Amino acid sequence: MVKSLLRALKGEDVWPPPIWLMRQAGRYLPEYRRLRAETPDFVSFCLDPQRASEATLQPIRRFAMDGAILFSDILILPWALGRDLRFTEGHGPSLTPLRAVDEVQSLDLEGFLGRVAPVLETIGRVRAALTADHPATSLIGFVGAPFTVACYMIEGGGSKDFAATRRMAAMEPALFGRLIDVLTETSTAYLLAQIEAGAEAVMLFDSWAGLLPPSGFQSYVVEPTARIVAGIKARYPDVPVVGFPRLAGTMIGAYAAGTGVDTVGMDTAADPGVARQLVPPHMGLQGNLDPFALLQGGAVMENEARAILEAMKGRPFVFNLGHGVMPPTPPEHVAGLVDFVRRV
Ligand code: CP3
């Protein structure tokens, strides 16, 4: 019996739709805050299989989601490639900005898989726990898509416009293309290793895809994603791949047509009725409740969720948010949302 999330992600119309939420493990859960306080350094926390598997399972125990997303971070890959990475409270990630050819050349393509061994161990532990205690829940592995990971590596952390990255993409295409190629190859290998370790579906987070013009979107979002998907499908044709090209607007049409992903994630700004026309009916859609509607809860949340469900009825769909759960969200609102979606 194939689990409902995997069926929907592969293009089957499953109703009520399966549900999981981006950032379902995290600071809005008191049990996460307690666990996290034991390991102040976030990178160490991500690389601790016992604690990372516990964080992955916390929302499953509370809400019995259809999907468990691996607890890790998209910036673990640049860390494993040899870039330094720190997370500071209230500030987010910081890395040494990457700007020169020799910095791309010295990325450690041989050693990176060894450094993510603890993440692969987390996957194995979570998969065993799900099989034993939550057999309907599927384990989702992930990477950041090359463009988004490049944004953080070049900028040296978060930014409101990632101007240094966009400048490099426009003015130094050979250097930028080399970095994208390295991230494409290593992301493929990393996802294959995650599947070998027990991930049942994989997702590519392209949080900043919408910063590019259509030509750049084709070169740096669609083409690298297509290469990663082809690499996965060559070995694991049945493992569903979800792509989340955040803020891509109408470019999700080109994304759906050109990448080979099975399901396209809709961000908060996507109109589900329009997305439904831009993405062919055999492909899944996932999303896209406003995280602030979840924060608010009650009738507002239910009305927003109902509108999304109505727009998605009759096609393969997975209920999710349009971006991650906000830290101040009351856990009861998440319970209420899961219950609401399962009663449709
Ligand atoms: O529950 C889950 O979604 C699983 C784990 C997960 C995390 N980050 C944990 C995390 C996943 C899938 C991510 C993806 C991620 N990380 C993205 C793509 C999705 C998106 O949000 O656009 C990005 C851009 C990152 C990079 C990142 N990690 C930033 C910018 C930050 C700081 C902002 C913040 O929310 O603190 C992080 C930190 C982070 N990653 C936290 C968690 C739970 C919070 C850190 C903490 O607990 O102290």
Image (cartoon, rainbow, N blue to C red):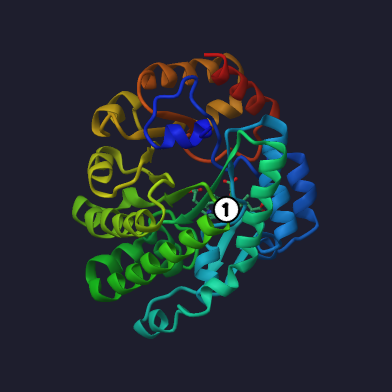
Q: Residue at x 65, y 25 (%)?
A: 333
Give the image quarter of residue 134.
Answer: top right
Q: Determine whether, in the image, residue 338 is placed left or right of residue 169.
A: right
Please, what secondary structure does the residue beneath circle 1 have?
A: loop
Q: Determine whether, in the image, residue 72 is placed left or right of residue 51.
A: left
Q: Residue 27: tell me if it is visible.
A: no
Give the image quarter of residue 216.
Answer: bottom left
Work out whether residue 114 or residue 292 is closer to the camera in this orientation and state it: 114
Estimate the x, y position of residue 334 in percent, counting from the top left.
63, 28
Q: Residue at x 42, y 36 (%)?
A: 9
Q: Residue furthest left?
A: 215
| Residue marked by disc 1 | 198
Q: Please say if 330 is above or below 132.
A: above
Estimate the x, y position of residue 296 in percent, counting from the top left.
59, 24
Give the image quarter of residue 332.
Answer: top right
Q: Please say if 231 is above or below 255.
A: below
Work out whether residue 221 or residue 280 is closer to the camera in this orientation and state it: 280
Q: Residue at x 66, y 64 (%)?
A: 47
